[in-house]
Amino acid sequence: MVRCPPMRLRCLFILLALWTCALVNPGNLGTVDTTRRLQVARWIRLGEPPVRADDPAAGPVGRNGVRYLPTGIGQSLVLAPFDAVASGTIGPFLGRFGLDAARRAQVIELAVAFLMQWFLTAGLLMLAYEVLRSFAFSPQMSAVGAVALLFGTTVLAYVQAAQENLLLLTLALLLLFAIRRFLAEPSPGWAVLAGLASGFALLTRMTSSFETVVLGLYGLASTSDRKRFAAGFLPPIAAALIFDRWYQYYRFGSVFSTYIGVTQNQLRPRGTPENYYFSYPFWKGFLGALFSKDKSVLLFDPLLAVLIVLAIWKWRELSRELRVILALLALLALIYIAAAAKYVAFGGDVAWGDRYVLLPVQLLCLFTVPLLLTRSGTLPAGAKYGLWCIAAAAFVLQAASTVIAPNLEVEQRKLGFDRGVIVNRGINLEEIARGREQPARFAGVPQEWRSLYYFPFQLRFRFPALARWAIAAWLALLATLPLVILGTIRAARRSRIP
């Protein structure tokens, strides 16, 4: 049986999440998608319009002529308490500093983004640690794996941009953790927790049905107490689906309509095919998710390539449980890639990597560094060195993903600079660092996108006097981050968990 990590380690995970979110926070939610979901949270909490009057493109018209956001309600339910805390504690003081309504709203949005991402990042670290422990990795290796998931994969970019990805990954880790605990200790509570994680993920994005089915079947097939597991796992999912269908009926008057269906009926551009939202060539989308220069999961998450090599080379040495979960997560990744292959907004457009398929990729990458540390000893020296170089490059790449706004390379692609997002990111960082930006590369690009994307540096454009102090504090956090990471790993090594 896997026990909970000691309090010291949990506190260090929370502290590491705090440090990380404070460092990468851009001062906003990072995406209009989450801004719109925040407005839904205020509709639920305060009775405001579900879509702002100045944002008519946010969603189609529903019942009684009201415009609604057609997507799931899950992230809005998470945003609501953080918005209530930020608005209730910070809001009353902002007026004393002479800030107008727009600036007050920006500060509250910053606080909401920081609080929500901190909460989710801390949960992600603790759950990643627990999942690795359940597969017999040592406490130290499990802590290293959790830290590597945060800093060596696309997770870091989605800590900065508060899209649904971080929430969905945290829920998927909770689902897998609860299933693993049920297999070790067949208590109905763990099955219920797994069902709750799946149900909430379904309320957030319906593609979560993929991991619900794959991991749910894994739980059923791996236990002799199938009736007990099903009795706890299925009711929360059924309740979530009923609530989702009621929510759809409340907004659009139909139980069987979908997000894509409603949007396509009202917002499909003129002259486009009826299946416009799924009109992208399938094989171009499928192979693009694997190999394209702008969205390849192998390019944006190089730890996946390392894992593939390790898994093939060391497959027979891995435990049966680990082989099963790696195979199932690989299958889940293929399902996600196939399901998103025809979607017209290939890869999620303005996003670091293909955000529609990253969840199973990130779950796979969780196992990479622990396996590299424990299974690469007998590899040929050249192969071992090469794998470690790719792993090191992955950490550098993810740090680079947060330095400037992701919008920059998208705009440059429109200007004809189409060598790929990662190559363009390297060129942009080099030119910005040297202060020698090519005018053609940055034509029409806002200054904010050409500067460091972290909040203290963005503050220079609005409050330069305050920015000096904020930058000094940011640099102090950056200098002490390695100490927090090392302290976390050391605490795990010293733990007495069997």
Image: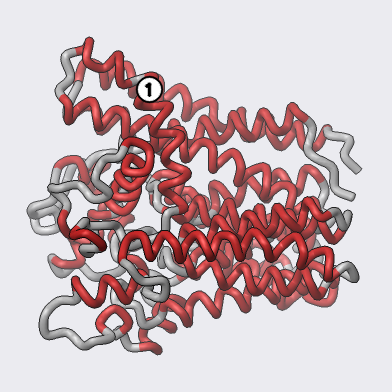
The colour scheme is secondary structure
Please indicate, yes or no, whether residue 430 appears anywhere in the rendered image.
no
Q: In this view, does 130 lie to the left or right of 241?
A: right
Q: Where is residue 173 in the image (x, y as percent from the top left)?
A: 64, 55
Q: In this view, does 305 lie above or below 132?
A: below
**Crowdedness of circle 1 by 10 Å Cα count: few (<14), some, many (20+)?**
few
Q: In this view, does 248 lie above or below 323?
A: above
- Residue at 67% x, 28% y: name it: 11
Q: Which residue is drawn at 77% across and 74% down?
A: 324
Residue 223 visible: yes
Location of residue 163 with respect to 112 vertically, above or below: below
Numbered disc 1: secondary structure: helix
Amino acid type, residue under disc 1 in the picture = Gly
Left or right for 372, reference 420:
right
Q: Mark 1 points at which residue?
A: 88
Residue 435 is left or right of residue 214, and the answer is left
Tell me which residue sits at (25%, 54%) in the image.
407
Q: Is residue 266 shown left or right of residue 207?
A: left
Q: Is residue 167 above or below residue 493?
A: below
Q: Quadrant of the C terminus?
A: top right
Residue 293 quadrant: bottom left
Percent x, y of residue 362: 56, 61
Instruction: Point out residue 480 in the picture as x, y percentages from the top left corner.
Output: 54, 26
Residue 6 in percent (x, y) is at 79, 32
